[in-house]
Image (cartoon, rainbow, N blue to C red):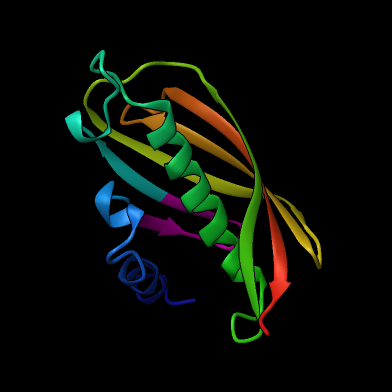
Amino acid sequence: MNTKKLLKAFNDRNKNTLMQTLDIEYVAIGEDYLTAKMPVSSKVHQPYGQLHGGATAALAETVGSAASNFFIDSKNQFINGIQLSINHIKSKRDGVVYATAKNIHKGKSTHVWEVTIVDESEKLVSVAKMTNIVLEKK
């Protein structure tokens, strides 16, 4: 697996999307995980100056959805997220957060991911569980 090439391909697909708006960048990839980072600034704050839970959820869903692409035939199939549950553990005002999706279940029609979001000190910020459905292209 050429990780640099895969990461570049994933990041290139982010152009003109919410991921580009939130400055989400894929930074690490392995056999059973995908990691992305997102800067924490006023761009992703809620009115009290903290990381917005919706931005965190968008990061979690981005990584969980993208990770499912490893397990499908992308010429004939595509992924849609059908469920996301997230718990916010710690607030964050600045710096960077990292989201890592790890596979819990890889079925023919559904994938389930655990997504952990940590700060630069590896302190847990949020944890999510995401389910994707695998659909056939028509």
| Figure check: 1 above or below 22 | below
Q: Does the magenta stretch include residue 82?
A: no
Front-most of residues 61 and 127: 61
x and y, in percent, of residue 131 in the image: 69, 48
The structure residue drawn at horizontal position 81% and vertical position 62%, both measured from the top left corner, is 107
Q: Does the magenta stretch include residue 27?
A: yes
Residue farthest toward the top in the current orientation of the protein: 48
The structure residue drawn at horizontal position 33% and vertical position 64%, both measured from the top left corner, is 14
Q: In this view, does 129 lie to the left or right of 23?
A: right
| Figure check: 109 above or below 55 | below
Please state, as top left, top right, bottom left or bottom right, where the C terminus lies in the image: bottom right
x and y, in percent, of residue 37 in the image: 34, 45
Front-most of residues 44 and 31: 44
Please name the predominant secondary structure of the magenta segment in the image: strand
Span highlighted in magenta in the image: 26-35
Can residue 87 be seen by looking at this rendering? yes
x and y, in percent, of residue 92 in the image: 31, 20
| Figure check: 106 above or below 88 | below
Q: In this view, does 130 lie to the left or right of 44?
A: right
x and y, in percent, of residue 108 in the image: 81, 68
Can residue 25 be seen by looking at this rendering? no
Front-most of residues 6 and 107: 107
Q: In this view, does 60 lie to the left or right of 71?
A: left
